[in-house]
Amino acid sequence: MNKEYQILLFYCYADIKDPLGFKNTHHFFCIKNNIKGRIIISSEGINGTVSGKQKDCKKYMNELSNNKLFSEIDFKVEWSDLNAFNKINVRVKSEIVNSGLNSKDLLKNKGKYIEPKEFKSIIKNPPKDVTILDVRSNYEHKIGKFKNAVTLDIDNFRDFQSKISEIDDKIKKSDKVITYCTGGVKCEKASAFLKENGYENVYQLHGGIIKYGIEEGGENFDGKCYVFDERIVKDVNSINPIVIGKCYVTNQKTDRMVNCANILCNKHFPLSNKGAKIFNGCCSEDCLKNGKVREFDGSGFYQKKLNGYNPYIGLDKSKFSKTTGKLFDS
């Protein structure tokens, strides 16, 4: 394997007493060790996707794994020819995934883990009383999902709890329900919410789609997996892949996902080569003719200009020693 970079997808629910203080220290560690990506920190834990060279990613994984708060952290590690990010962004938010389900007591009764190997055998020949539930948003499952999975009409995960009536219509409460998402962070809360609402046999795919792809070849995952980095989508299934995405403009099959070229729209949607030529990477004629339209280069990802970018933005660097990366005594 000659690829130079690694991409790490991870999360860990943990009781962080001082999220802002931890964010400051963690941000500085990322700068010192050439780690780039997006990291969310809150009082309930950490969630992120980062990228860097192998030696730097190893340091990063050791830094978190050796912290007692994150003893249960599980890194999904992929290789890449390029860095998946061009800057570091570490933020403090109220939740590590936007759900509106931010009660710490909720997670005490989450669904049990099903490992990728067991999940593979289930999805090959699913029993009648087993339902596979995709808890991701519309734009994610429209480009890729597990075969025969139940999907929900939601624009973001925050809408999940409002769909309990729809879930009740689609799934028997006596069924065994296996939830899944990209890396697992949403399923922790989704599975707990289902149990709170009367579903007793609730499970979650450990490590989500990405871990399943790494460990079991992604068999019976149809399409591609939407990811939250510059790749936009990635291959998961190396065994029996098919394309399920349909171009938003032409309705042709496609596995390319883009953002609308109109910066005021920025809609996520599948786009074929033919569709791209019709509206120059926009989702509609209206978007093409109104607003600021970016040049479409075929990727559908629009890199923000780094004019004036400083990795120390958002970091109170006056409190740190640039030599040790440790806080100065107050």
Image (cartoon, rainbow, N blue to C red):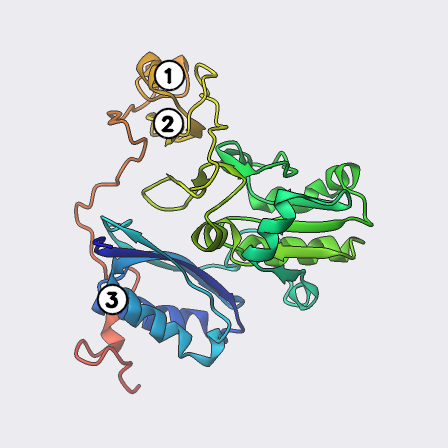
| Amino acid type, residue under disc 2 in the picture | Cys
Residue 291 horizontal/vertical position (percent): 33, 22
- Which of the two residues, 137 or 203, is positioned nearer the viewer here? 203
Residue at position x 29%, y 87% in the image: 329
Residue at position x 41%, y 44% in the image: 227
Residue on which the image places disc 1: 275
In the rendered view, does 61 fall on the left or right side of 156? left
Residue at position x 63%, y 67% in the image: 104
**Cα separation between marks 1 and 2:** 12 Å
Task: Give the number of the disc on residue 260.
Answer: 2
Q: Residues within 10 Å of mark 3 (few under 14, many from 20)?
A: some
| Amino acid type, residue under disc 3 in the picture | Asp
- Which of the two residues, 203 or 294, is positioned nearer the viewer here? 203
Instruction: Quadrant for residue 164, please give it.
Output: top right
Mark nearest the camera among 1 and 2 is 1
Asked if one can make out residue 134 in the rendered structure from this viewpoint, the answer is no
Residue 140 horizontal/vertical position (percent): 50, 38
Q: Residues within 10 Å of mark 2 (few under 14, many from 20)?
A: many
Disc 1 is placed on an element classified as helix
Residue on which the image places disc 3: 56
Disc 3 is placed on an element classified as helix
Residue at position x 43%, y 53% in the image: 214
Residue 30 horizontal/vertical position (percent): 28, 66
- Residue contact at pointers 1 and 2, CB within 8 angstroms: no
| Between discs 2 and 3, the one toward the N terminus | 3
